Image (cartoon, coloured by chain):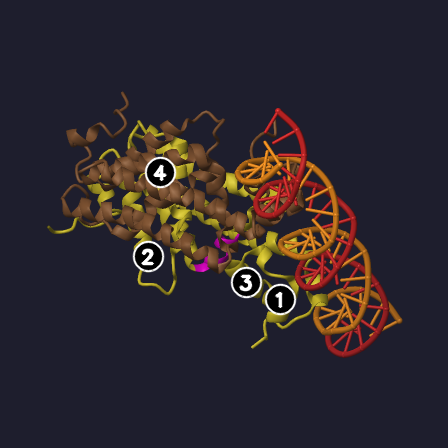
Chain colours: A yellow, B brown, C red, D orange
Amino acid sequence: MAEKPLRDRIIDTALHLFEKYGYHGVTVDRIVAESDTSKGGFYHNFKSKDELLYHIHDVFITYALTKAQEAYESCSTPTERLYAIVQSFVKVFHLYKPHITVFYQESTYLKPEYAEPINEKREEFKQIIFRVIREGIEAGEFRPELSVEIAGMSIIGMVNWTYKWYNPDGPLSIEEIAAYFADFILHAVLCTPQNPTAARFLLPPAAE
Amino acid sequence: MAEKPLRDRIIDTALHLFEKYGYHGVTVDRIVAESDTSKGGFYHNFKSKDELLYHIHDVFITYALTKAQEAYESCSTPTERLYAIVQSFVKVFHLYKPHITVFYQESTYLKPEYAEPINEKREEFKQIIFRVIREGIEAGEFRPELSVEIAGMSIIGMVNWTYKWYNPDGPLSIEEIAAYFADFILHAVLCTPQNPTAARFLLPPAAE
DNA sequence: CTTTCAAAACCGACTAGTTGGTCTGTAAGC
DNA sequence: GCTTACAGACCAACTAGTCGGTTTTGAAAG
């Protein structure tokens, strides 16, 4: 072990410690000790503890944003797009759960100069969701009485909250969760969930 | 001004400082300075900074739990119960937004002896939601293909996430948000949202 | 109504421990 | 020989909590 570059070992160790104990619950000395490196090595690779926190934020939000854009572009109708975005969004948890936990728990502690670029990407991500909902309503696929903002934040909230309870080693696989979420959301927004072209995104009706 | 009991002034000040800057972003000295009290007064009223954090947690979760129980008991059908619980749950934000923010941001920093009673109440709250969904499925009002846990966590997630974006001084009132959430959730879980007895809980269909 | 007096409430200078960050030095690569 | 990567002792700043002392309170005694 301990063959990876020192920088990556630090990030890895810090990530899991932050996830478990919170940013302020972990000292630089501890990160250094558990990643089997040194104070010197740490500050050679990072300007400060804050920069490390920023890096963790950036890796996640950049990935999530890219995936959402890809999902948007890879489909052509609002229903398909919403389905694809929810799918990719949920599945990010499989790879990035520790990042996401740190992201949503510790972002208040980002120094302003670090918070700015992160917030921009965050806003872009949100706008993609809002856009899909808006286009879905305009296209007549989604219920016109929906509020774009509230429906959008509902979706973002229910998916993001997953980081509080999802356990990668638990009985529910990320694919199952994604399928249930998609079903839940589509039933909430579609005009006609019984629509046969949307049916492939829904759960099969349970037999009585 | 400054007529309220010192203890309340400390809690009030701390609450808003914690909400804005996080538990670790606020020192006891600052709480004391901004509440116009003293170190001595602080430690006369609280055993420690941790105890103050616990107190904030407890006030909120106790209230939320009580409200959920009342909502459950005040109705007799699963649909009505779910509606009532969502309504009361969302409306808690009106009074307790700072508490809720602190609750969900800082609970990792609760010392074990404080975390335990909080987690018990939290679990109880969750079980009320799960129970309503389970009973709704059994009664044939909710779609049988739902997963009780995932649907439950979806609801809890979307409502809780509100603390990240709800602004009491913004254009959306808490009543509007509650109505949209209830509509979203009921469409997601009901077998037949068009059911006339459920219709009074939904948004009126928008004219084309 | 006044005095007494002890307990509770409150004050703020001080402390002990902790923590992010620095600095000097060393070894390896080019 | 010179830059880059890393090591680890050291430091300055900060912060939760303490402790001796002062004020307020309220009830009982005079």
Q: Quadrant of residue D12?
A: bottom right
Mark 1, residue position: A30
Main SS type for the magenta part?
A: helix
State the CA–CA distance, disc 3 to disc 4.
33 Å
Q: Can residue A53 be seen here?
A: yes
Whether callout 1 and callout 4 share a subunit is answered no
Q: Assess disc 4: are there few (<14), some (14-19) or many (≥20) residues with their C-alpha within 10 Å of its C-alpha.
A: many
Mark 1 or mark 2: which comes first in sequence? Answer: 1
State the CA–CA distance, disc 2 to disc 3.
27 Å
Viewer-proximal residue among A181 and A121: A181
Q: Do residues under tags 3 and 4 come within 8 Å of each other at their CB atoms?
A: no
Q: Is residue A96 magenta?
A: yes
Tell me where residue A175 appears, x and y as whole percent: 32, 57
Mark 2 or mark 3: which comes first in sequence? Answer: 3
The chain ID associated with circle 4 is B
Q: Amino acid at mark 1?
A: Arg
Q: Is residue B172 magenta?
A: no
Element at label 2: helix
Q: Quadrant of residue B18?
A: top right
Q: Amino acid at mark 4?
A: Phe
Determine the residue positioned at 64% across, 67% down: A32
Element at label 1: helix
The chain ID associated with circle 2 is A
Task: Give me the disc on residue B128.
Answer: none
Mark 2, residue position: A175
Mark 3 or mark 1: which comes first in sequence? Answer: 3
Q: Assess disc 1: are there few (<14), some (14-19) or many (≥20) residues with their C-alpha within 10 Å of its C-alpha.
A: some
Mark 4, residue position: B89
The chain ID associated with circle 1 is A
Say left or right for A74 vs B188.
right
Mark 3, residue position: A17
